[in-house]
Amino acid sequence: MGSLWSVFVQGLSTIILLCCGVETTALERDYTRPGPGRIILTQHTDSSSFPQQVHVSAVGEYMRISWITDDQSMPSKVEYGKVPGKYDAVAEGESSRYLFYLYLSGKIHNVKIGPLEPDTVYYYRCSGVGDEFSFKTAPASLPVEFVIVGDLGQTEWTKSTLAHIGMSDYDMLLLPGDLSYADWHQPLWDSFGRMMQPYASTRPWMVTEGNHEIEALTFFGMKPFIAYNHRWPMPYEESGSDSNLYYSFNVASSVHVIMLGSYTDFESNSAQYKWLVADLAKVDRSVTPWLIVLFHAPWYNTNTAHQGEGESMRKAMEALLYKARVDVIFVGHVHAYERFTRIYNEAENSCGPVYITIGDGGNREGLALDFDANHKYANLSLFREASFGHGRLRVIDGKKAHWSWHRNDDSVATVRDEVWLESLSSSSACHDGTKLKDEL
Ligand SMILES: [Fe+2]
């Protein structure tokens, strides 16, 4: 049944792509990728009542626990506590399921638990049955360590990336889009959720959408992001956003993280743009010295893959982020690693953000191998390499952070690039909080 479904959906997808030009651009079609990586299908071998695909995401002082049961009668309930096997608190939440053409999802549970103490391990159990999980909350103050990785997929390469991520501790994972590469084939979302569970159930995973999350079937009246929005709800309402496709949150009282959407409206009259203006205006850099932004399609990119795809968003939003003195912008989409200098308006600018492409998580499409040595941004690019891996941003204090890129095509994760970053909030030449607020 699974293979028949796969053949049907892939055939349907091809017809739609050919007829209607959904999602795939001329640039993507022209790009010749290296051979695909082997997809790992992660099966569910327990009973239908057994919780699966468990992942957690931070919601202020709370944690949202998300999981799926095939059994529709299982309750949306989380028992939790600070001692293994001893649950002195319980919280109930909500559930949903969705229909995607012929596929009907399992029961998707979402429960917020808390308020929780910072930097504390909690043990929890979902739906009153199954395995015990645990996670650690982020610290209340710096230092804090982020893992950042995009374009994950579920291949042998993904497995290697995840293993390297798991080798050393971190507080929160940030993912700038392209999660499962299900591409309309919904069982792959389930397989992805199972593969991520050992990692995503133990630390908050905060994600934003990439092009592989769109999955629109407009011909059949199916809107974009159906699976993504059901399976990976993020704290958008808590940050005043009206969409799961863009939101923000604070970490360790000192880092404001903004997740933007490359595949929803971003022009100056859009809801996303207006929300971003309001969100930036609320950030007091004397209290929250670090401001980092993630989205999917890069604005600066010297790889031959995906050239120009982020250009309209750059033209719409770059000035706004520059005025806000964003420290670093992380993107994915290009399956390689690239770090730029500080940039504004296509030129080096000491008050602009550092741009980092980290779309090398391990997707099935392979690496984007070709960088253009003569690209107009080549002089702004400080390090670039087409290898799978992940990044780590360790924010030490209000001024300093350490960025490192860990390549994983070696048997052990190797630090191939690293740099110390200084927050623009500590630069008197770049930052005048009062004036910036007025400009926004
Ligand atoms: Fe992408």
Image (spheres, rainbow, N blue to C red):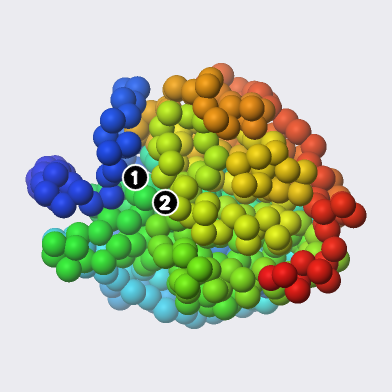
Residue 178 can be seen, yes or no = yes
Q: Quick check: 364 left or right of 396?
A: left
- In whole angstroms, how far apart are the C-alphas of marks 2 and 1? 10 Å
Beta carbon at label 1 within 8 Å of ligand 1: no
Relative to 239, say whether 246 is above or below.
above
The residue located at (58%, 32%) in the rendering is 377
Sequence-wise first label, 2 or 1: 1
Please name whichever residue, 104 or 397, is drawn nearer the observer in this view of the structure.
Answer: 397
Residue 55 can be seen, yes or no = no
- What is the three-letter code of the residue carrying label 1? Tyr
Crowdedness near tag 2: few (<14), some (14–19) or many (≥20) residues, C-alpha within 10 Å: many
The residue located at (62%, 47%) in the rendering is 345
Snapshot quadrant of residue 380: top right
Snapshot quadrant of residue 401: top right
- Residue 174: give x, y in percent of width and height: 58, 51
The residue located at (50%, 38%) in the rendering is 359
Which residue position is annotated with label 2?
210
- Residue 26: give x, y in percent of width and height: 27, 39
- What is the three-letter code of the residue carrying label 2? Gly
Beta carbon at label 2 within 8 Å of ligand 1: yes
Proximity of marks 2 and 1: CB atoms separated by less than 8 Å? no
Please name whichever residue, 229 or 298, is drawn nearer the observer in this view of the structure.
Answer: 298
Relative to 293, say whether 253 is above or below.
below
From the image, state whether disc 2 or disc 1 is nearer to you: 2
Crowdedness near tag 1: few (<14), some (14–19) or many (≥20) residues, C-alpha within 10 Å: many
| Total tally of numbered discs in the picture | 2
Name the element at disc 2: loop
Which residue position is annotated with label 1?
181
Relative to 34, say whether 167 is above or below.
below
The residue located at (45%, 53%) in the rendering is 312
Relative to 112, say whether 157 is above or below.
above
Name the element at disc 1: loop
